Amino acid sequence: MSEQFYSDARLYDRLFPGGEQSVDFYRTEAGRQGGCVLELGSGTGKKLIPIASDGHPCVGLELSPDMLAEAQRKADERGVKVQWVLGDMREFDLGRTFDLVFIAANSLLHLQKAEDLVACFRSVRKHLAPGARLIFDVFNPSVRMLAQADGVRRRRDALSFVDPDRGVVHVDVAETYDAAAQVTRGRWYFSTDSEADFSVAPLEMRNIFPQELPLLLTLGGLRIVERFGDWSRAPLTADAALQLYVCAPD
Ligand SMILES: C[S@@+](CC[C@H](N)C(=O)[O-])C[C@H]1O[C@@H](n2cnc3c(N)ncnc32)[C@H](O)[C@@H]1O
């Protein structure tokens, strides 16, 4: 359950700024495909707003009303038109097709059960126009990091950020790994020097190991066209932090 984590969209954007390489990657792919673009789990529109500003008709489907409202606010501020839809990527019917569907920044890892992942891929399949692609990125699980998930709360200095209203915000995370479910269960604590734990939110992420994906995609009516291990399109190797997939209908 991670809904609470996405209930403060401005905090989310301050926690995770940047991501220029991934924005450039998806922007390039949208240009290569041409036509209409759908993002599932579109968040605050970090990728979709730049793609729409390039002239692509864009739809963003998102589960969190707060993230959707912030995306709408940012698009309006930039004068960019995007159709924002409240919905669940596990099952959706937009009644039309797209030239590119993408799922960025680990959004897919919020689907924990294999049947949810397959249902999502099946819904995507129905929304692909001839020649269209599904592209998504998820992290490549590190068994070393999973083994270290001992439930102890630790400060993540690299994640500290400045909130204009609160000042410097420190981030602590406590994580355990449920090996049967392949789910990392985290608890994120946000504090300032004057206000300890002003926000505490659970965040759960499925770990999808590389050999699972061909099977899950096949069950969803899709096949892998290309697979990369970083944003420069290097091959997916054992030590790659990222899994990046380009898929087409089977
Ligand atoms: C890590 S954020 C990524 C946001 C955006 N794609 C980006 O690149 O910045 C994951 C997003 O997926 C959304 N999400 C989680 N489960 C979802 C679901 N079942 N259907 C649609 N969106 C979902 C969350 O609300 C959140 O906005």
Image: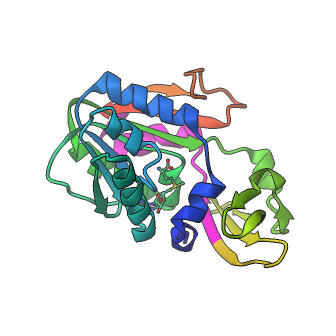
Of residues 54 and 108, the one drawn nearer to the viewer in this rendering:
54
Q: Where's residue 136, x and y in %? A: 45, 40
Q: Where's residue 40, x and y in %? A: 37, 51
Can residue 89 be seen? no
Q: Where's residue 234, x and y in %? A: 60, 20
Q: Which residue is rendered at x = 55% and y = 63% of the image?
A: 10
Q: Does the magenta stretch include residue 52?
A: no
Of residues 147 and 88, the one drawn nearer to the viewer in this rendering:
88
Q: Is residue 151 left or right of residue 141?
A: right
Q: Check the image and report above or below for 91 versus 16.
A: below
Considering every residue shown, the one lying at the far left of the view is: 95
Q: In this view, does 113 lie to the left or right of 122?
A: right
Q: Which residue is rendered at x = 73% and y = 70% of the image?
A: 190
Which quadrant would residue 236 be assigned to in this image? top right
Image quadrant occupied by the C terminus:
top left
Count of labels in the image: 0
Magenta-colored span: 202-223
Q: Does the magenta stretch include residue 217?
A: yes
Q: Check the image and report above or below for 189 versus 80.
A: below
Of residues 188 and 123, the one drawn nearer to the viewer in this rendering:
188
